[in-house]
Image (cartoon, rainbow, N blue to C red):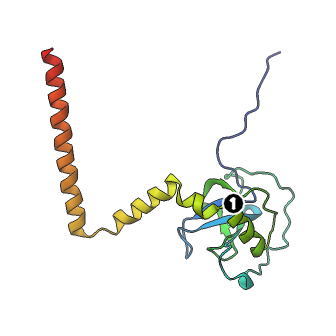
Amino acid sequence: MSQSDVVSSQWPQVETGRVVLINSGKDEGKLAAVVQIIDHKRVSSIDPLSDLKNHRSKYTRFSVSSDLKYSRRAIVLALVDSPHVERQEVSLSHVSLTPQVINKLPRAARSGVVKKYWTEAGVDDTAASSTWAKKRASREKKRQLTDFERFKVMVLKKQRRFEVRKAVAKATKARKSS
């Protein structure tokens, strides 16, 4: 008989403690952690730095059949929470899964617990130093440029392109002559 190996997926899985980036709504661009998977279409999140008194949610006692990891296609909604956003139900089509996971975060944890685990894991520091955050900051900076600043960038790129072409032409000419 032939032997087969089972290899887990390299894609991020929707799981309790997964850090997500919210892509739409009033909390766009903020990080949150998946606190509980509501159903295959919803998750719940909490922002650890937000006011803890406002985090009473009807999903606090909602139970899910298992604590397994789910692929993004199977899950559509989850409850998310973090120090930066209020505890809320979020559709997974409105978030991006990051590679970061808060380990051992209890399922359906309240805001205070989420904030504690959030700071222990150093989510904000890790996220700020990631290439993903740097790219987002670069895009935001580029979006804020004025018309004249965009023109100056275009001129500088044109000068750089000219210098590169000149160096390449010189190198190819030297290679042909030798």
> Residue 102, relative to residue 83: is it above or below?
above
Residue at 20% over, 44% down: 161
x, y percent for residue 148: 20, 68
Q: Label 1 crowding class (10 Å Cα cut-off): few <14, some 14-19, many 20+?
A: some
Front-most of residues 143 and 125: 125
Residue at numbered disc 1 = 121
x, y percent for residue 102: 72, 58
In the rendered structure, the answer to whether residue 96 lies left or right of residue 119 reads left
Residue at 71% over, 57% down: 75
Inspect this view and state whether residue 78 appears.
Answer: no
Q: What residue type is labelled 1?
A: Ala
Kindly indicate the quadrant of the structure image that contains residue 107: bottom right
Q: Element at badge 1?
A: helix
Front-most of residues 173 and 94: 173
Residue at 24% over, 58% down: 153
In the rendered structure, the answer to whether residue 44 lies left or right of residue 63 reads left
In the rendered structure, the answer to whether residue 146 lies left or right of residue 49 reads left
The image quadrant where one finds the N terminus is: top right
> Residue 54, relative to residue 9: is it above or below?
below
x, y percent for residue 156: 20, 54
Residue at 76% over, 32% down: 6
